[in-house]
Amino acid sequence: MDLVQKYGISGMYRRVSETARYGGLTRGKRAIGPEVKKGMKKNLKEIQDGTFAREWVSVYEKEGQRSFQKYMDALEAHQIEKVGMKLRKMMWPNDQVS
């Protein structure tokens, strides 16, 4: 996102690996297509009509900061996080990365 923000989408593609560029250009529409757009519109509607805020306040009032933990636990257990941690340790062995 930093590259997109600084250079735009085409500028980002000029600055990533050729594999990432090819994948984004040839497979991107599979990841960002009509179903994603439909879901994003639903999210926007829930923000605009107050559904999201009411839900968030209700959950936080009941659970406090614990409300995040179940989501964080699931995210940290995901395979992409496990692989990412291994890769970061290989790239920056002297840093404390997670």
Image: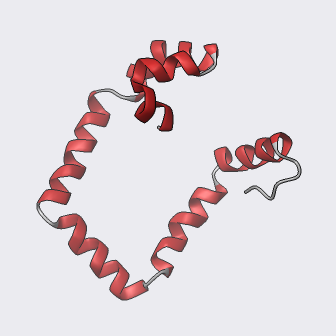
Q: Residue 36 placed where, x, y %?
A: 31, 35
Picture quadrant of residue 46: bottom left
User: What residue sits 73% from the left and 43% below the top?
Assistant: 83
Q: Tally the numbered discs.
A: 0
Query: Residue farthest to the front?
Result: 6
Q: With respect to residue 12, does 81 lie above or below?
A: below
Q: Nearer the viewer, residue 75 or 16?
A: 16
Q: Choose top left, top right, bottom left or bottom right for residue 21.
A: top right
Give the left or right position of residue 17, taking residue 62 as reference. right
Q: Residue 71 vs residue 77: left or right?
A: left
Residue occupying image coordinates x 63% and y 51%: 78
Looking at the image, residue 48 lies above or below residue 84 = below
* Screen quadrant of the C terminus: bottom right
Visual colour scheme: secondary structure
* Figure check: 62 above or below 15: below
Question: Residue 87 sits in which quadrant?
Answer: top right
Tell me if 25 is positioned left or right of 34 in this view.
Answer: right
**Residue 43 x/y as whole percent:** 24, 51
Q: In the displayed image of the protein, which residue is found farthest to the right?
A: 94
Q: Is residue 6 above or below residue 69?
A: above
Name which residue lies at 71% across and 44% down.
Answer: 84
The percent coordinates of residue 52 (x first, y second) are 24, 65
Could you say where residue 44 lies in the image, as x and y percent from the top left?
20, 50
Q: Residue at x 50, y 19 (%)?
A: 13
Residue located farthest toward the left when viewing the structure as drawn: 49
